Structures are given as C-alpha cells and as structure tokens.
Image (cartoon, rainbow, N blue to C red):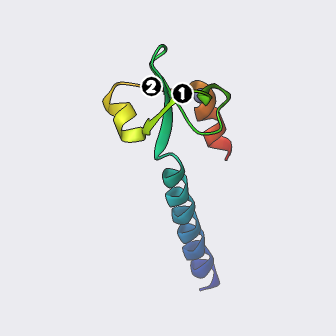
Amino acid sequence: MMVMIILFLTIIFFLYLKNKKTKNINYVYINEKTKKYHLEGCPYSKNLKQISLEKAIEEKYIPCKICNINKNYT
Ligand SMILES: [Zn+2]
C-alpha cells in the first residue's frame, strides 16, 4: 500500500516537472543565418530575435546542440 502511494506521488511530481519545463521553452531565440533556435540562457541566444517555439518549428528552425544538452541537465 505504501509503495503505491510513493509511486503515485512520484508520477505527479514528474508530470509537474514536465509542465514546468514546457512552459519555460515557449519562447526561443532564432538565428536567421544558421537557421537554428536557441533556448533562454544559451550563450548563443544573445542579441537574437525572440519568437514562439511553435513558430520556430513552423519556419523549419532546428534546435541548437548546446541548448539541448543543457536542457537535459536542468
Ligand atoms: Zn543554443
């Protein structure tokens, strides 16, 4: 019984984290030269245009490697 409660709480916690994460990446920074988009906090996101992630994907921008690596750790 106790195990079930812990499992349940763990699932809720992960769902909460997932929601929090997606909220943070609603906006990205696009580099029109390299056709890549960057997340906030990426060293390459400085002085770039900010647009929504949806629009960036729509316009065929690809995610920056460095941002993706960082994203996995946060
Ligand atoms: Zn980046």
Judge the density around disc 1: few (<14), some (14-19), many (≥20) Cα neighbours within 10 Å. some
Q: Which residue is mark 1?
A: 48
In the image, what residue occupies the spot 55% across and 26% down?
Answer: 64
Q: Position of residue 32 (x, y in %)?
A: 45, 18
Task: Examine the rendered structure and indicate whether residue 56 appears above or below residue 4.
Answer: above
Determine the secondary structure under disc 2. strand
Q: Which residue is mark 2?
A: 62
- Distance of mark 1 from mark 2, alpha carbons? 15 Å
* Amino acid type of the residue tagged 1 in the rendering: Leu
Asked whether, in this view, residue 24 is left or right of residue 6, the answer is: left
- The answer to the question of whether label 1 and label 2 lie on touching residues, with beta carbons closer than 8 A, is no
**Quarter of the image holding residue 17?**
bottom right
In the image, what residue occupies the spot 54% across and 27% down?
Answer: 48
Task: Examine the rendered structure and indicate whether residue 10 appears above or below residue 61.
Answer: below
Q: In terms of sequence position, does the residue under pointer 1 or pointer 2 come before the other?
A: 1
Of the pair 31 and 16, the residue shown nearer to us:
31
* Amino acid type of the residue tagged 2 in the rendering: Ile
Q: Position of residue 19 (x, y in %)?
A: 49, 59
Give the quadrant of ligand 1: top right
Determine the secondary structure under disc 1. loop
Q: Position of residue 35 (x, y in %)?
A: 44, 19
Q: Quadrant of the N terminus?
A: bottom right
